[in-house]
Image: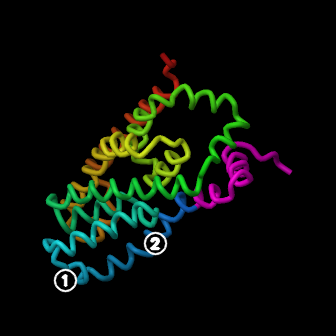
């Protein structure tokens, strides 16, 4: 039998320590895609439903805020889908509400991540002393890591919430640095949604030159920042 190494081995270790950690990792990894497969076809086939909504009414804004926060916070839909759809349907007046939705989703995702993870990270790191030492040395600089992880267009929002919960970064630090880090890619996707000509384009985010340039720039910047965080010598 082939020796199990790498990510699969670490996943097994986490599952042994706390089965909820294994379940949560699977959930935040796969559930947003499953949710998209269910919700996107429904949205595309029912555009008239959105047309009947009055997005200027307070009750509609409140319900939309709650629904979007739950979708993102519980990892039921990717944040990029929510941002693109919000830009298409509501335009720039809704952008502050989207940022607020991200904030509420962050609190929700971090809360259930802490509940599911508990003190599992300490137990896992006890088997990896070098990693434990590195995290301890970097504990005062977690805001920098949060910022660059949130900036990355390839690290899922829900997954990062769960990892930050395991690292016990704290709500305030996560909200401040996480919100700042999310703004560039959120604004980029939202802007693309405002330019979309139909609901399908807004949801699926076409491969325009603008998107490619923004994606590449944010990816390179986030990689540089995360690499700098882990290689910088503690003061």
- In this view, the residue in front, 119 or 220, is 119
Q: Does 25 lie within the magenta span? A: yes
**Residue 179 shown left or right of residue 157 in the figure:** left
Picture coordinates of residue 194, whole percent (x, y): 19, 60
Residue at 55%, 25% in the rendered image: 137
Local secondary structure at mark 2: helix
Picture coordinates of residue 199, whole percent (x, y): 26, 71
The circle on residue 75 is: none
**Residue 104 shown left or right of residue 11 in the figure:** left
Q: Does 153 lie within the magenta span? A: no
Residue at 40%, 54% in the rendered image: 107
- In this view, the residue in front, 190 or 179, is 179
- In this view, the residue in front, 207 or 235, is 235
Q: Which residue is mark 1?
A: 52
Picture coordinates of residue 70, whole percent (x, y): 39, 66
User: On the image, which quarter does residue 150 sit in?
Assistant: top left
Decide which of tag 1 and tag 2 comes sooner along the chain: 2
**Residue 23 shown left or right of residue 61 in the figure:** right
Q: Which residue is mark 2?
A: 37
User: On the image, which quarter does residue 148 sit in?
Assistant: top left
Q: Which residues are magenta?
A: 1-26
* Front: mark 1 or 2: 1
Q: Would you place residue 42 above or below residue 97 in this image?
A: below
Local secondary structure at mark 1: loop
């Amino acid at each position: 039998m082939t020796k199990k190494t790498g990510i699969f081995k670490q996943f097994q270790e986490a599952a042994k320590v706390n089965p909820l950690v294994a379940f949560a990792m699977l959930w935040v990894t796969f559930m947003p895609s499953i949710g998209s497969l269910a919700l996107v076809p429904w949205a595309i086939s029912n555009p008239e439903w959105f047309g009947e909504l009055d997005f200027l009414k307070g009750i509609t804004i409140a319900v939309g805020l709650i629904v979007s926060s739950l979708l993102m916070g519980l990892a039921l839909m990717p944040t990029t889908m929510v941002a693109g759809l919000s830009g298409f349907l509501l335009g720039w007046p809704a952008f502050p509400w989207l940022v607020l939705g991200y904030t509420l989703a962050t609190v929700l995702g971090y809360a259930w991540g802490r509940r599911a993870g508990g003190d599992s990270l300490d137990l896992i790191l006890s088997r990896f002393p070098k990693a434990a030492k590195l995290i301890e040395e970097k504990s005062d600089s977690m805001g920098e890591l949060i910022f660059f992880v949130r900036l990355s267009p390839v690290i899922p929002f829900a997954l990062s919430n769960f990892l930050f919960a395991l690292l016990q970064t704290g709500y305030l630090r996560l909200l401040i640095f996480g919100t700042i880090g999310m703004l560039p890619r959120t604004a980029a996707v939202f802007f693309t949604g405002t330019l979309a000509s139909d609901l399908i384009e807004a949801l699926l985010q076409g491969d325009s030159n603008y998107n490619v340039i923004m994606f590449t720039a944010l990816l390179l910047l986030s990689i540089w920042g995360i690499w700098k965080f882990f290689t910088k010598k503690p003061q």
